[in-house]
Image (spheres, helix red, strand yellow):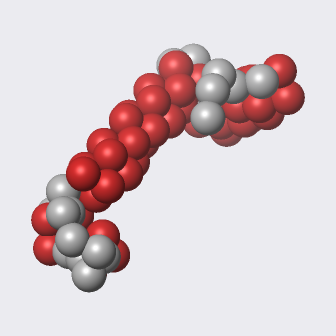
Amino acid sequence: MGAINKDGMDFLSDLGRRITQSTDDHHESTFLFQRLSMLLLYYNAVAVFCTIAHTTAEDDCSHSSTCSSF
């Protein structure tokens, strides 16, 4: 859907700062962005795979065993 806008970056930066304050680990903001990046990659792969894996109209991604293997 595009890049993260300013409000989204402000929210994520604030969240990372609060997690850092809570855990006293100065790498938490970096870890947060890494986790979000991996989740986006994972769910984009699921979305793409589930749209191209089926060739008939009767198939539904939510009922497919191949999509649940992700």
Question: Nearest the camera: 25 or 49?
Answer: 49
Q: Residue at image x 45%, y 38%?
A: 40
User: In the rendered view of the protein, which quadrant contains the N terminus?
Assistant: top right
The structure residue drawn at horizontal position 37% and vertical position 51%, both measured from the top left corner, is 47
Q: In the image shown, does 40 or 21 lie closer to the viewer?
A: 40
Q: Is residue 20 visible?
A: no
Give the vertical position of 28 relative to 58 (above or below).
above
Total tally of numbered discs in the picture: 0
Residue under the image location 39 percent in, 42 percent down? 44
* 63 and 24: which is toward the camera: 63
User: Residue 66, position in %: x, y?
Assistant: 14, 65
Q: Position of residue 6 (x, y in %)?
A: 83, 21
- Residue at 71%, 31% in the rendered image: 12
User: How far from the left and from the top, in percent, is residue 69?
Assistant: 16, 63
The image quadrant of residue 23 is top right
Task: Locate residue 11: give its quadrant.
Answer: top right
Q: Is residue 3 left or right of residue 47?
A: right
Q: Is residue 22 left or right of residue 62?
A: right
Residue nearer the viewer, 44 or 35: 44
Which of the image's four quarters has the C terminus?
bottom left
**Furthest residue toward right:** 7
Q: Position of residue 20 (x, y in %)?
A: 64, 28
Is residue 64 visible to us here?
Answer: yes
Image position of 5 (left or right of 27) = right
For residue 61, above or below residue 51:
below
